[in-house]
Amino acid sequence: MRRTLASLIALPLVALVTSVAPAHATGGAEGVPAFSHVFLIVGENATYSQLTVNNAPYQTLHLRPDAAWLTNYWATSHYSTSNYVAMTSGQYNRCEQEDVKPIDCHQRVANVFHQMTTRGISWAAWNESMPEPCYLLNAGVNRDFNSYRPKHNPAEYYVNVVKDYSNPDAECTDNVIPAGTTGPNDMSAFNSALANHTAPAFNYVVPNMCEDGHDNCKPAGNVLTQFDDFLAREVPLIQQAYPDATVIVTYDEGQGGGANYGSKFGGGHVLTAITGPDVVPNDYSNLHNHYGLLRTVEDGFGLPYVNNAKTADPINEIWA
């Protein structure tokens, strides 16, 4: 049964994550280690060269020294939704490229979320400011710091996750969940899962439209720092709760395209940084994209490759 906003408010925050208790997978292939917990955090619309000490101090001064810092990583396309879908299913279609909401644009295609379900691996798509689980419509506004947009929530674009778009299936309502309340920039449910060690094996973390850097919320001119501040607040909590975690920070797309605009590398030059106990911190210049990131996640969890992940290069040069 679909939960209502009122019922969510009535529940303790920890109750939101009881359906995503940890399950550990066996994996490791192509030089990628077996993953225990993965936290994949996605920011918005930042070209690699835009990230500086002034506007992204946490990423450049604190994250980078401990990370595999990928200097030649490219988004696949424009605009947002096509990249979210690309990094979770290895493909995208035309209406996803046009950012159409999932209730009007969805497809029955293999994806990493349903792969996890069928293999018995726990997962959650954590969406900041989402009013209720598997919510398919826009909600909130930037002035209240609680703007949620399903176009940044790729799990909802897959028919095998949602099933019925007028009455979503339990696979969606149990796993595609709010990261907190609809209060300002609230990640309290996610943070409770960290504190109580109830986070699932695979965590896809999407901030709201302020904290992901999509929209310029107060103070003016702070768009890049909004996501950097989010990372500075949340990544240390993840690392403290789960020292075994692989934390992946990436961006959906950059400004402009690549050398082969419209190709698998046409979404602009973006940062991807990866930390974890098996990562060798360094700068790495190998060419990668969202399809290769998906293949890497599939390698680490022992999943088969889907769609364009089948021919993508895994990120396997960064591990001890």
Image (cartoon, helix red, strand yellow):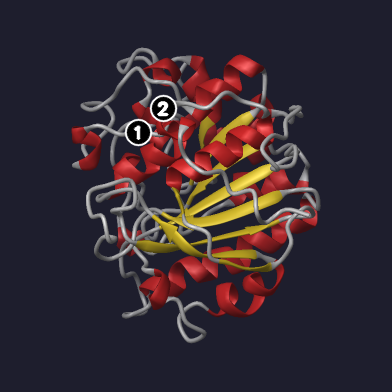
Return the x and y of residue 70 as percentages of the image width and height: 54, 63
* Amino acid type, residue under disc 2 in the picture: Asn
Residue where numbered disc 2 is placed: 307
- Asked if one can make out residue 178 in the rendered structure from this viewpoint, the answer is no
Position above or below: 252 against 6: below
Q: Nearer the viewer, residue 167 or 113?
A: 113
Quadrant for residue 135, please give it.
top left
Would you say 83 lies left or right of 14 here? left
Check whether the beta carbons of the residues at disc 2 and disc 1 lie within 8 A of each other: yes
Q: SS class of the residue under badge 2?
A: helix
Residue where numbered disc 1 is placed: 91
What's the residue at 39%, 60% (across, down)? 145
* Amino acid type, residue under disc 1 in the picture: Gln
- Asked if one can make out residue 304 in the rendered structure from this viewpoint, the answer is yes
Would you say 83 lies left or right of 290 here? left
Position above or below: 157 against 166: below
Return the x and y of residue 308 as percentages of the image width and height: 40, 33
Q: Nearer the viewer, residue 297 or 204?
A: 297
Position above or below: 206 against 59: above
Q: How many residues crowd mark 1 within 10 Å: few (<14), some (14–19), many (20+)?
A: many
Return the x and y of residue 98 as percentages of the image width and height: 18, 42
Task: Identify the mark nearer the N-term, 2 or 1.
Answer: 1
Position above or below: 165 against 286: above
What's the residue at 40%, 19% (across, down)? 162
